[in-house]
Amino acid sequence: MKLQRVGVIGATGLVGQAIVEWLLRFGYLPDYISLFASQSSDGKSLTLGQKNFSVLSLTEKAIQTLDVALFATDAAVSRQWISIAQSRGVVCIDNSSAFRQDPSVPLVIPEVNGHVLATHPQVIASPNCSTIIALLALAPLHHTLRMKAFTACTYQAVSGNGTEGLRTLERERQCGDSFSEIYSDRIEGNVIASIGIPQGNGFTDEEEKLCHESRKILASPELQATATCVRVPVERAHSMALQARFESSVDLAMAEEQLRYAPGIHYTLTSVATPFRCAWNEDCFVSRLRKDPFDDKQLLLWTVGDQIWKGAALNVVQILNRL
Ligand SMILES: NC(=O)c1ccc[n+]([C@@H]2O[C@H](COP(=O)([O-])OP(=O)(O)OC[C@H]3O[C@@H](n4cnc5c(N)ncnc54)[C@H](OP(=O)(O)O)[C@@H]3O)[C@@H](O)[C@H]2O)c1
């Protein structure tokens, strides 16, 4: 039984609802959980984990009644409200990109760098979903083999765009027309090799987040990381092909051993992980581990994870549990 007063901001969204469900699963009492969203959701009722909740619009008065605020809002909303919450002494854990590159804010995947929470920071950022899924597989290898570089090609589900991404795919499936308010082209029956905002260097902000965040979390500023982020017509769970180069020649059996015992990972030698099978799982699934036949310092692998659970909501609640 956990008696902290926890506020979930953005509680009507995909990540916010999953946070509430994870809080209940971990034993936080419903009476101590408050749900907030935008003004348009004020007074709305939600049933989550078989408990009924009322949603309120966020106010300065409401935020100071909390011990902890878990943000599942976009970066602009998080930035605005976290500075207010901070001034009231509320501990904030944020899902958005607003504070991830702030050197004073730890960026945390508990299984990878949970030790940074020992300083009891007041604001903590949860990484981009693809960063979490990639690093759960790469960090255990990095810790023993010293990773020098990696390349990621992602296959990201539409729910990565929140409620609106799912709605778009559903409408396109039902009506056959294109409803690309958030995509540059139809997404149903298609693959779009660009996610986020172009940065003027050929990469998008989504691709840069994966690289910059990995360097910060692994405390490896020299890590050579590049990514191509692709949207695919899958509802839930992100998949990723990773190619990683290490300091010296890699022993495949030793790498397998690292992955088999790594926390948060289900390593499978025999089957191929798919988003259909891996959605709604706490663990990320790693398969198809291979050695590059042309470079004995290099490994290739395939990883899949539920980006709403471990890529966001579950990671945030695990951070809270550690605190
Ligand atoms: N979806 C993923 O796979 C994923 C993974 C990792 C991280 N994230 C990050 O998590 C955050 C939430 O994503 P999501 O997918 O859950 O988005 P979403 O489904 O679109 O939900 C957005 C939430 O923000 C709320 N909101 C909007 N304006 C607000 C305001 N002014 N004050 C308070 N609440 C406000 C919305 O409330 P209303 O319903 O009232 O509009 C809704 O509850 C984003 O920063 C996203 O980048 C998402």
Image (tube, rainbow, N blue to C red):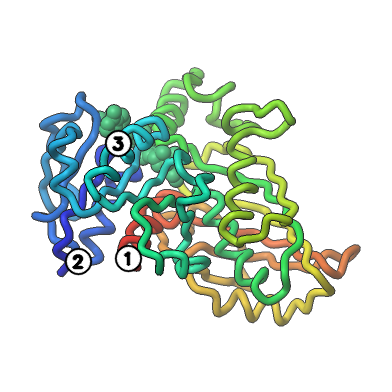
Where is mark 1, residue-wise?
323
**Is label 1 in a helix, a strand or a loop?**
loop
**How far apart in space, not on screen, are marks 1 and 3 (Cα)?**
21 Å
User: Any atom of ligand 1 within 8 Å of the CB at mark 1?
Assistant: no
Rendered location of residue 101, percent (x, y): 53, 45
Rendered location of residue 133, percent (x, y): 54, 56
Where is mark 3, residue-wise?
81
In the rendered structure, the answer to whether residue 7 lies left or right of residue 141 reads: left
Which residue sits at x=50%, y=56%? 305
Which residue sits at x=69%, y=62%? 301
**Is label 2 in a helix, a strand or a loop?**
loop
**Is label 3 in a helix, a strand or a loop?**
helix
- Disc 3 residue type (three-letter): Trp
- Disc 2 residue type (three-letter): Gly
Rendered location of residue 159, percent (x, y): 44, 39
**How far apart in space, not on screen, are marks 2 and 1 (Cα)?**
15 Å
